[in-house]
Image (tube, grey):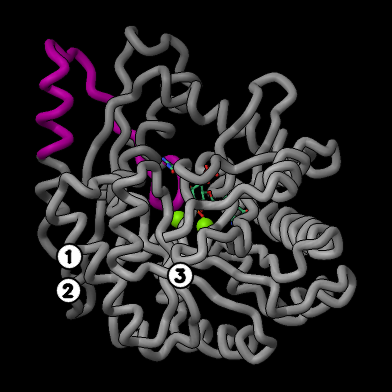
Amino acid sequence: MARLSGDEFALVLADMRHVDDAIHVAQKILDVFHQPFNVAGHELFVTASMGITLYPFDDRGAQELLRNADVAMYRAKEYGKNNYQFYVAEMTAKATERLSLENDLRSALARGELSLHYQPIADCRSGRIVGMEALLRWKHPTRGMISPALFIPLAEETGFIIPIGEWVLRTACEQCRRWQKQGFPSLYVAVNLSSRQFHQKDLPASIYRILHETGLSPGSLGLEITEGLVMQQAEASISTLRELKAMDIRISIDDFGTGYSSLSYLKRFPINILKVDQSFVRGIPGDADDAAIAGTIITMAHSLGLRVVAEGVETVEQLNFMRQHGCDALQGYYLSKPLPADRFEEFLKNGTSLAKN
Ligand code: C2E
Ligand code: MG
Ligand code: MG
């Protein structure tokens, strides 16, 4: 047994007969850590995370084996600590891939690989297009299109989300203003904000500057945030939201119903719109639970004085359900997929809309 650094130890098990021997030892170590340690009259709890690599199967060199064990240990930590993980080659592949993606993301903005697609949002009653959601796209030079679900978390961790997010806001505001001038004066644009962006100190000031520079009126800008994000620092969030709302910007809670929604906070958050998450819309009309949840969200939102936008509406049955339940607006493949700016413009100019209710 050796101590490698501060709280990192290496344990070599020689003469193993079977992989189970390693599991057995790992389990014995974990058991020890289930007991508290008594230090100067205090009971202390310590967790242990272990990575296991096998010689000669995984690697032969000492350096490689230590690196493998390290990678596997990080995986154990990710899995909530107090457990062990065996090294598998794809862990290194994943870690390497992540690193190269991270490097590429660093220059994506400067190389013009990012763009925005726009998905129309229609008023349920009149069927008219009232606005659009801006959705970020990354066209990687060799990998092709990379989903925002994949690279936004990376941008968030590395902090690139700050310059990227500012670019998204500016581009979306400019675009919306341009379309307003082209004969769609009441159009609004909704922009997604990630946690790090939202909790940035000067967010309201930076948004104010972007609106001023692009000439878009604050009433034409919507910001989409998730419940989890506001709950992280509820008090600070409420004050940021108040500032934004005082500017006349509309605030939506995105993916509503998927996080730990606290109804008491919902009452205190100065927000305008709830977006019913597409996971509830998907099951309508067949799934009675989904229908009940979606219906309840609409009723509750209305009684709190909020508007409701349904996400991911794909079928005419789902459209009808939303209309019957008094949902205010909707977006989804039924109306249109997110479109590049030029195609969205055609869509607008063709006068496309939902059939009237
Ligand atoms: P979101 O804000 O909830 O966006 C809705 C997602 O649902 C989009 O995925 C959209 O393409 C997809 N969608 C729309 N209609 C339908 C439908 O009828 N059926 C199905 N199955 N899907 C539909 P997308 O564009 O891949 O974006 C994924 C998520 O990435 C977004 O979820 C949002 O959280 C995040 N995101 C996108 N752009 C940005 C951005 O500029 N900044 C930040 N911070 N996050 C972004
Ligand atoms: Mg959204
Ligand atoms: Mg959503």
Task: Please give the residue where the numbered disc 1 appears in the rendered image.
Answer: 37
Crowd tier of the residue under label 1, counting other residues whose Cα lies within 10 Å: few below 14, some 14–19, many 20 or above = some
Instruction: Report x, y in % for residue 125.
Output: 45, 66
Name the residue: 73% across, 79% down: 218
Is 280 situated left or right of 308 in this image?
left
Name the residue: 32% across, 33% down: 51
Identify which amino acid the numbered label 2 is placed on: Glu
Identify which amino acid the numbered label 1 is placed on: Phe
Task: Please give the residue where the numbered disc 3 appears in the rendered image.
Answer: 253
Identify which amino acid the numbered label 3 is placed on: Ile
Residue 52 to residue 129: above or below: above
Instruction: Report x, y in % for residue 208.
Output: 78, 79
Query: Does any portion of residue 27 appear in the rendered image?
Result: yes
Determine contact: label 3, label 1, CB under 8 Å: no
Q: Nearer the viewer, residue 266 or 18?
A: 266
Whether residue 19 is in magenta: the answer is yes
3D distance between C-alphas at marks 3 and 1: 44 Å
Is 153 situated left or right of 20 in this image?
right
Name the residue: 14% across, 65% down: 36
3D distance between C-alphas at marks 3 and 2: 42 Å
Task: Please give the residue where the numbered disc 2 appears in the rendered image.
Answer: 43
Q: What quarter of the picture does the N terminus occupy?
A: top left
Highlighted magenta segment, given as a residue range: 4-27
Name which of mark 3 and mark 2 comes first in the sequence: 2
